[in-house]
Image (tube, grey):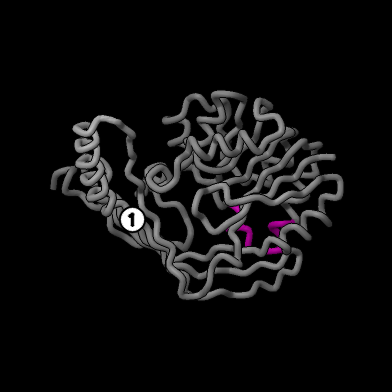
């Protein structure tokens, strides 16, 4: 079988774990623009040139690293290895749990992005996070969350790669662009993702209140002649805005808490910013 005929077609087990067979950088880049996310993060930070400890898409960290010192953190050894190989601009790459790393890291800007909070599915996880943030003085902390009010049982969220467009006043060039766009649109039909929300379970935690979504996830991407085709079942934590706002206000009284739109465009989420006052 040639390389162009190979297809990754599998169900990832155990639930929610990274698989060495899946190149997550390709998945992230197909449906979300890492550069746009980096620009949004820089916009949200009071001092976007100050050093930052970062969890999220590695390519986003690489864009941030062009303007400041970035310590990238991920718990997956596979992601860490690929990050070191692909993004040499990132100053520091650290394997481990972000809460554990924060306990020993006095960096004043903290960014925990791209849905990592969906894995915080117990009150203990939030207690550890709060303790880690408060372990050292911080200027600002950004965290994004899935929004419970934006989803419902039986809902499907479809992700599609968008074709790039070009503007032109020349009719002939416009025609060429339109033909190219049609071809890209045809190709992009192969670039798809589907999140199928099966049911929600109420977690016993009240600080904050957590609702767990049971989701069937599938992706199909044609990348450099390879069909990346896989699916898995997973559980992700969702929160109401008021739940997170109340928790932050109680736990971080020396910080101003503000909520804004999702960090990832068209995602069912919201961004929280903690600014020291």
**Residue beneath the point at 61% across and 25% down:** 68
Task: Identify the image quadrant of residue 276.
Answer: top right
Q: Residue at x 81, y 36 (%)?
A: 137
Q: Is residue 211 magenta?
A: no
Q: Nearer the viewer, residue 218 or 93?
A: 218
Apparent side of residue 18 relative to residue 111 in the rendered image (left or right): left
Residue 222's spot in the image, x, y percent? 26, 48
Q: Which residue is mark 1?
A: 192
Nearer the observer, 136 or 159? 159
| Residue at image coords 71%, 33% | 46
Q: Taking 44 as reference, is 161 above or below it?
A: below
Q: x%, y% of residue 37?
A: 53, 40
Residue 150 as seen in the image, left or right of residue 234: right
Residue 119 falls within the magenta-colored stretch: yes
Task: Give me the residue at 70% from left, 29% from top.
Answer: 47
Lateral position of residue 251 relative to residue 263, left or right: right
């Amino acid at each position: 079988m040639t390389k162009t005929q190979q297809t990754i077609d599998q169900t990832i087990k155990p639930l929610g774990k990274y698989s060495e067979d899946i190149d997550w950088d390709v998945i992230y880049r197909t449906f979300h623009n890492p550069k746009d996310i980096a620009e949004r993060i820089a916009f949200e930070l009071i001092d976007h040139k100050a050093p930052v400890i970062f969890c999220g898409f590695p390519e986003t960290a690489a864009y941030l690293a062009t303007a400041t010192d970035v310590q990238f953190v991920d718990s997956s050894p596979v992601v860490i290895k690929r990050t070191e190989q692909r993004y040499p601009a990132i100053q520091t790459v650290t394997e481990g749990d972000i809460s554990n790393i924060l306990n020993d890291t006095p960096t004043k800007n903290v960014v925990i992005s791209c849905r990592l909070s969906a894995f915080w599915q117990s009150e203990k996880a939030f207690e550890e996070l709060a303790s880690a943030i408060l372990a050292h003085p911080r200027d600002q902390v950004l965290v994004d969350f899935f929004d419970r009010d934006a989803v419902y049982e039986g809902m499907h969220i479809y992700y599609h790669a968008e074709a790039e467009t070009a503007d032109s006043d020349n009719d002939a060039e416009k025609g060429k662009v339109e033909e190219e766009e049609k071809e890209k649109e045809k190709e992009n039909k192969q670039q798809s993702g589907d999140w199928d929300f099966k049911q929600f379970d109420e977690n016993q935690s009240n600080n904050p209140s957590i609702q767990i979504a049971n989701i069937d996830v599938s992706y199909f991407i044609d990348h450099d002649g390879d069909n990346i085709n896989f699916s898995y079942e997973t559980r992700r934590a969702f929160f109401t805005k008021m739940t997170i706002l109340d928790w932050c206000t109680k736990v971080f009284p020396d910080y101003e808490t503000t909520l804004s739109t999702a960090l990832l465009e068209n995602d069912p989420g919201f961004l929280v910013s903690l600014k020291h006052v």
